[in-house]
Image: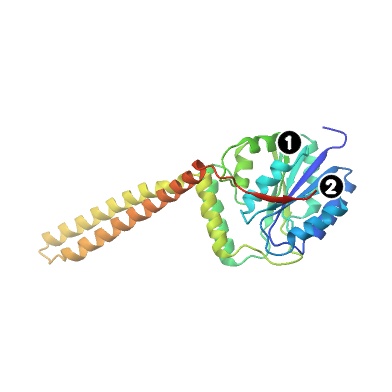
Amino acid sequence: MKTKEKLSMVLPAYNESGNIEMAARQLEALCCREELDYELIFVNDGSKDTTWEEICEVSKNNPHIKGICFSRNFGKEAAITAGLECASGDGVVVMDCDLQHPPDVIPSMIQLWRQGYEIIEGVKTNRGKESGWHRIAADGFYRILSQAMGMDMKNASDFKLLDRKVVDVIRSIPEKSRFFRELSTWVGFRSATVNFEVQERMNGSSKWSTGALIGYAIGNLAVCTCLPMQFATICGGLSLFAAMIVCIFMVVQMKQRMAVDYLEMILFCVLLIGGMILVGLGIVGYYIGKIYNEVRGRPSYIVSSKTK
């Protein structure tokens, strides 16, 4: 390690005009206390408010602050990717600029990094204020993801400190559809964890609606695992089992000389099997769409401007 390491901090921002100045001030003070050479990289993900103007303003007063502005909203994963590609530090911290990821935890991460750990992950001890439905949905998503990956992703977060070699490996991976939490776990390396409590937002409100979270979860699940594609196989097994039950029921009725309503039986079987086939085809089609997006080679994001 160098006597004075350089630490880059990547902060995706979407409609966070009220938090930019405060985040810059707190992180600047932290790096000065830790005697670190540093850079703050704010990535404006197509915000509709004055987030970019705030980033430009704080960068005028501090040469350690950089800003990247997307041409439109490309999503948080693209913003993190852009920040990692711009970062030049020996270590890179990824965190939310609304300060729900507490800066006070970063010194503990730096200490572990100096001890030789290459990935230091912030693990949530609580999820902050969330609706019951949001909590249940999030727990279900991470339980499925953990089983699919064979890793515990239940309390994973985007709040991490990555060593330069880890950043270089992640940058070298060519895939465009990314899930940072999964990817930073998948690459391996020597890792450690630091617990933190999710803080309340100082300004503004969450930009994640229930629909957006569901879409985000489905998209990332498709990126991380092919497990949903096995649903078609499961449906085939269930439909075969249901057909056997119906067949046994009909044979029993015939042996007891009871009237058999063949029309209802046939309708039930057709609806059951047809529904399962359509669901299976829908899942396969979703994966084909992901493949199509990768093959056509469009960039993950487009930068419209940068701070000087």
Q: Residues within 10 Å of mark 2 (few under 14, many from 20)?
A: some
Q: Is residue 282 above or below residue 210?
A: above
In the image, 5 versus 260, the foreground residue is: 5
- Looking at the rendered structure, which numbered label has been put on residue 61? none
In the rendered structure, which disc, 2 or 1, sits on the residue that comes first in sequence? 2
Residue 151, image quadrant: top right
Q: Is residue 132 above or below residue 64?
A: below
In the image, 203 versus 78, the foreground residue is: 78
Q: Secondary structure at mark 1?
A: helix
Q: Which residue is mark 2?
A: 64
In the image, 204 versus 87, the foreground residue is: 87
Q: Residue 43 in the image: state x and y as whole percent.
A: 71, 52
Residue ranking furthest to the left? 257
Q: Which residue is mark 1?
A: 164
Residue sitting at 83 percent across and 37 percent down? 5
What's the amino acid at mark 2?
Answer: His
